[in-house]
Each structure stands twice: as C-alpha cells, then as structure tokens.
C-alpha cells in the first residue's frame, strides 16, 4: 500500500553503547547516512540509561510511546518526558537519558533549516506523517503513514484516529 510503512517490516538494530535498539522507518534522501540525511524517522527500544549520539545541525523531537519513564539531561537541566508528550531539542547538545524501565519511543530528526513539529491526539490529515497509536482501517498500531501518498479513502478512514502527527 503506497504511503504506508508497516511496523511489522521494521528491523531493530543494536546501539553501539548496548543501551537499546533502533528501527529506522524512513530516511531522506533515501540511502543517506547519519551525516547527510535531511529527515529521519525511527522508533527505538531504550533499555538502559546512557548518552545519546550527537547530531550537529540537527533538531530532534522525541516522544515516549510506551513503557518506563525517561529523563533527558541537556545542558545541566533535567527534562522528564511524559508518555505521548513530544519533546523538542537540539541534536548537537550533549544529552543523556535516564530510564527506570525499558520503553519505546518515536524519534523525528531534521537537518536545519528544516523544522518539524509533532503532536499527539486525533490524526490530523494535514500532517505530513502520522504514526498510528491504535489499529484502524486495516492498519496496525505503530504503522506510519505518509499522508500525501495514501489514497483519499484511507486518509478519510484514519482521520481522527489516535496518532502522533508530524508536520514539516
């Protein structure tokens, strides 16, 4: 189905520090690496506390989807991330996460000057992407939709469903 990135197709790969795994959902331009992507969407299983990789020139929006509690330490300040409350921060600032139990998060990274905003709630059909938070219209929880690429019938069927909407 065009414009649908199924959760079932994701492959989680271990982090270098052993604290979790990440599954890339999409990366633009296709085939880009960590030094030259414009946009990267991924989910991560965070299993242990530890430092985040730094991404100079990149802004991030991180949203805890399920599981334990996460506290991000950025520039000497602690930020407790509540489930389904997106948190935006600069990827070039040293950051470490403290977790009390394994969790799953959704990560949006954009290279400046591109900007991203993430909102939790009813799916907004005007969003560029949507990560479904519940099964709907034959799709599974955590499937990602590229809204401009899905047909009008599917767009209508998922509008208002629980989701993380991403605007660029």
Image (cartoon, rainbow, N blue to C red):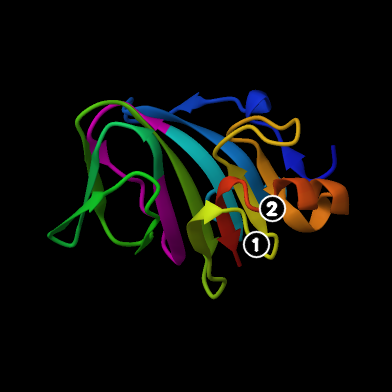
Task: Name the residue beneath numbered marker 2.
Answer: 159
Q: Earlier in the sequence, mark 1 or mark 2?
A: 1
Q: What secondary structure is marked by label 1?
A: loop
Decide: is 51 above or below 9. Answer: below
**Image quadrant in which you'd find residue 162:** top right
Q: Which mark is residue 127?
A: 1
Relative to 112, 150 lies left or right: right
Which contiguous range is marked in magenta?
45-63
- Residue 55 lies within the magenta run: yes
Quadrant holding the C terminus: bottom right
On screen, residue 23 above or below 89: above
- Which percent across, then down, holds residue 112? 52, 71
**58 falls in the magenta region:** yes
At 49% from the left and 59% from the top, the residue drawn is 119
> What is the x, y in percent for residue 46?
35, 31
Is 128 left or right of 157, judged from the image as shown?
A: left
Q: Nearer the viewer, residue 77 or 58?
A: 77
Please provide percent x and percent y for residue 66: 39, 33
* Residue 3 on image: x %, y %: 79, 46
Is residue 152 visible to us here?
Answer: yes
Mark 1 or 2: in front is 2
Is there any visible trace of residue 32 in the rendered image?
no
Identify the residue at horizontal 65%, vertical 44% (top origin): 26
Residue at the image position 68 percent from the left and 36 percent from the top: 136
Instruction: State the SS at label 2.
Output: loop
């Amino acid at each position: 189905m065009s414009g649908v990135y199924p959760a079932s197709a994701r492959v989680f790969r271990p982090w270098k520090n052993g604290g979790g795994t990440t599954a890339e959902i999409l990366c633009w331009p296709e085939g880009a690496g960590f030094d030259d992507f414009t946009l990267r969407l991924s989910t991560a299983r965070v299993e242990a506390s530890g430092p985040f990789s730094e991404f100079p020139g990149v802004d991030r929006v991180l949203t805890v989807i399920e599981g334990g509690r996460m506290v991000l330490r950025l520039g000497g300040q602690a930020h407790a991330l509540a489930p389904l409350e997106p948190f935006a921060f600069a990827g070039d600032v040293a950051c470490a996460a403290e977790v009390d139990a394994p969790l799953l998060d959704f990560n949006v990274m954009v290279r400046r000057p591109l900007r991203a905003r993430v909102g939790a709630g009813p799916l907004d059909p005007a969003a560029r992407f949507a990560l479904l938070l519940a099964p709907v219209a034959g799709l599974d929880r955590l499937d990602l939709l590229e809204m401009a690429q899905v047909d009008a019938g599917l767009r209508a069927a998922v509008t208002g469903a629980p989701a993380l909407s991403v605007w660029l």
